[in-house]
Image: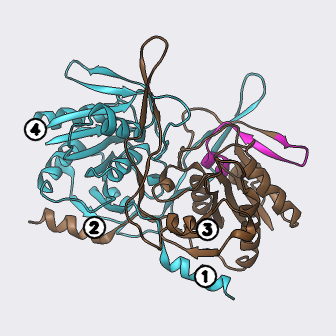
Chain colours: A cyan, B brown
C-alpha cells in the first residue's frame, strides 16, 4: 500500500523512523513529509504568514523523507498538493507521537492535526501515539507493529467523509499488550499550566506546562483503557455542530 | 458583565478594537489579551517550545490590553491562569475576525481556537467573525452591536460543558441584516492551495492560499445563510467521538 507519514515531533524523531522501517519491511511504499523541528502543540494550525520550503532528507541511510519548515498540517497539504500530487495514498499515519494524545490533547496535538488534515483531504488517516515514553524504554516498535497489522485488517474499508482514528498504544512490549478497545475522547484537561520564571535581566517569562486532570473516570475513556495496557482506538468525526445546544440557545433568545 | 476578548488578527486589529469599544460603551468590564502580531491560521495551537511574555498596551488612548508573543489559545490560558486569574469572566468573545470562519475554517482559525480554549476552561465563549471585509467598507460595528445585543439576551443561560458558538456576521450595515439563523458547520473546504514562487537565488518557496469549494449546498449551512445576509450562529460541541464510525471499524476488524 501507499502510506503517507507525518508527525509533530519532527522528521528526526525515533517514532516516525520506527514506523517507517516497519511499514517498509512489510513491503509498503512509504512517503515521509514531516516538520524540520519539533512542532508539538501546534494543533491543526497552518503557516500562512511566512513561505514554506521543503528539502529531501536521508533518514539514517535507510530511506528518505521531506522536511518542511512548517507545521504538521502544512506537511500534509504540501504532500497532497505538491510533493506527491500524483500519488493516491491508501493511508496516512501521523506519529508515532512521543506521548499519549488523550482527551483535550486532540485540540492541541500537531500529530492529531496532521491526521485531521489528511481526513479533510479524503485520505484514510490515523493519529498514532505511544504512552509515557519519557522514562527509559520507548516501545515505539509495539505501536508500529500494531499499526502495521491494523491497516492490513481494515485495508478494504473506506472511511466515511471527514472521519479518522485516534490510536494510543501503551508503552509496553507487544506481548504485554492486553488487546485493543474502542473508546471515547475522555474528559482529560489541564489546570494551572504556567511555570513563571525570570530571565537574567529580571523580566518574567512563562512556560506552558501540563498538569492533567481526569474529570470523569469513565471506563470507555481513552486514558482509562490505556492505563490498563489496552490500545485505545477512538473513532473521530470532524463535525463540530451540536444541534441540541443550538435549540437550547434559540429557546433562550425567544424568551 | 466581565468579558474577556482575544482574536487571531492581533491586538492592533480594528475588529477587536471596535468590539471592545462597543462593549465598554454598554457598561461592561472588558479584558483584552491578544497576540502581538497576526496569528491567523494557528488554530487551537499552543506555544510550548518557547517562553511566553506579555505586556500592557494602550489601544488608541481609549483602553488598554495585554499583548502576548504567542497564539490565541496561549492568550486565553494566560488570561485565565495568570493575568486575570482572580476574574470570573461572564463571557469570552474572540474576534471580530477579519473574514468569515466557515466549514473547515474552524480547524484552522486562531479566532475559533481562542474561543475553543475558553470553552475548555469553562468560560461561555463565542467566536465572532465578519464576512469579506477585504473590500472597502468594513462593517465591524455591525458585528460588535450584534454580539453586544446577543450576550445581553443569553446572559442568564449557562452553556453546557465544552460547548461554544461560532457566529459569522455578513459585511453589511446593521439595517441591512435580515436577522439570524442557526446553522450547521458546512462542508466548505480548500483545493490546490499552494502558490509556488522562486526567491532571488532561484530557490522555490510556497505560500498557502485558499481556493474555497463549497461541497454541499445545504440551506442550513453557515456559508449559505451568510451569503443571504443573515447572521450565522453555529452551535459547537468540542467532542470529536463518533461511535457509529467506531462500530463500523470494529465490524471490519472482526471479519
Query: Which is more foreground, mark 3 or mark 1?
Result: 3
Quarter of the picture containing the C terminus of chain A is bottom right
Distance CA(mark 4)–CA(mark 2): 27 Å
* Residue corresponding to mark 2: B245
Distance CA(mark 1)–CA(mark 2): 30 Å
Tell me what residue is drawn at x 64 percent, y 44 percent.
A194
Look at the numbered disc 1 and give the secondary structure of its residue: helix
Query: Which is more foreground, mark 2 or mark 3?
Result: 3
Q: Horizontal and vertical percent for residue B143?
A: 71, 62
In the rendered structure, find residue A250 and report the number of the disc placed on it.
1
Question: Which of A24/B20 is in front?
Answer: B20
Indicate which disc, 4 or 1, sits on the residue closer to the N terminus: 4
Marks 4 and 1: CB-CB under 8 Å?
no
* Residue corresponding to mark 4: A26
Q: Horizontal and vertical percent for residue B216?
A: 38, 65
* Residue corresponding to mark 3: B229
Q: Is residue B72 magenta?
A: yes
Query: Which is more foreground, mark 3 or mark 4?
Result: 3
Tell me what residue is drawn at x 34 percent, y 30 percent.
A13
Asked if marks 3 and 4 fall on the same chain, the answer is: no
Tell me what residue is drawn at x 88 percent, y 63 percent.
B25
Query: Which is more foreground, mark 4 or mark 2?
Result: 2
**What is the chain letter for disc 4?**
A
Asked if marks 2 and 3 fall on the same chain, the answer is: yes
Look at the numbered disc 3 and give the secondary structure of its residue: loop
Distance CA(mark 4)–CA(mark 1): 54 Å
Question: Which of A225/B62 is in front?
Answer: B62
Quarter of the picture containing the N terminus of chain A is top left
Marks 2 and 3: CB-CB under 8 Å?
no
Q: Is residue B110 shown left or right of residue A104?
A: right
A123 is higher (above) or lower (below) than B142: above
Amino acid at each position: 500500500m501507499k502510506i503517507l507519514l507525518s508527525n509533530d515531533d519532527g522528521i528526526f524523531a525515533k517514532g516516525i523512523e520506527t514506523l517507517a522501517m516497519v511499514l517498509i519491511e512489510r513491503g509498503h511504499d512509504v512517503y515521509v513529509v514531516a516538520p524540520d523541528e519539533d512542532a508539538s502543540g501546534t494543533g491543526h494550525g497552518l503557516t500562512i504568514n511566512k513561505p514554506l520550503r521543503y528539502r529531501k532528507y536521508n533518514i539514517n541511510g535507510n530511506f528518505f523523507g521531506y522536511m518542511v519548515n512548517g507545521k504538521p498540517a502544512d506537511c500534509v497539504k504540501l504532500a497532497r498538493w505538491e510533493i506527491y500530487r500524483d500519488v493516491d495514498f491508501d493511508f496516512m499515519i501521523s506519529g508515532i507521537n512521543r506521548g499519549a494524545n488523550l482527551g483535550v490533547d486532540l485540540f492541541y496535538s500537531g500529530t492529531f492535526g496532521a491526521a485531521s488534515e489528511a481526513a479533510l483531504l479524503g485520505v484514510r488517516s490515523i493519529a498514532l501515539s505511544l504512552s509515557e515514553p519519557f522514562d527509559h524504554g520507548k516501545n515505539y516498535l509495539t505501536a508500529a507493529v500494531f499499526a502495521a497489522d491494523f491497516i492490513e485488517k481494515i485495508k478494504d474499508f473506506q472511511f466515511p467523509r471527514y472521519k479518522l482514528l485516534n490510536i494510543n498504544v501503551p508503552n509496553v512490549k507487544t506481548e504485554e499488550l492486553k488487546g485493543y478497545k474502542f473508546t471515547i475522547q475522555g474528559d482529560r484537561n489541564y489546570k494551572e499550566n504556567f511555570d513563571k520564571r525570570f530571565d537574567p535581566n529580571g523580566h518574567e517569562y512563562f512556560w506552558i506546562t501540563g498538569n492533567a486532570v481526569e474529570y470523569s473516570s469513565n471506563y470507555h475513556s481513552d486514558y482509562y483503557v490505556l492505563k490498563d495496557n489496552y490500545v485505545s482506538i477512538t473513532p473521530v468525526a470532524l463535525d463540530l455542530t451540536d444541534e441540541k445546544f443550538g435549540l437550547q440557545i434559540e429557546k433562550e433568545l425567544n424568551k
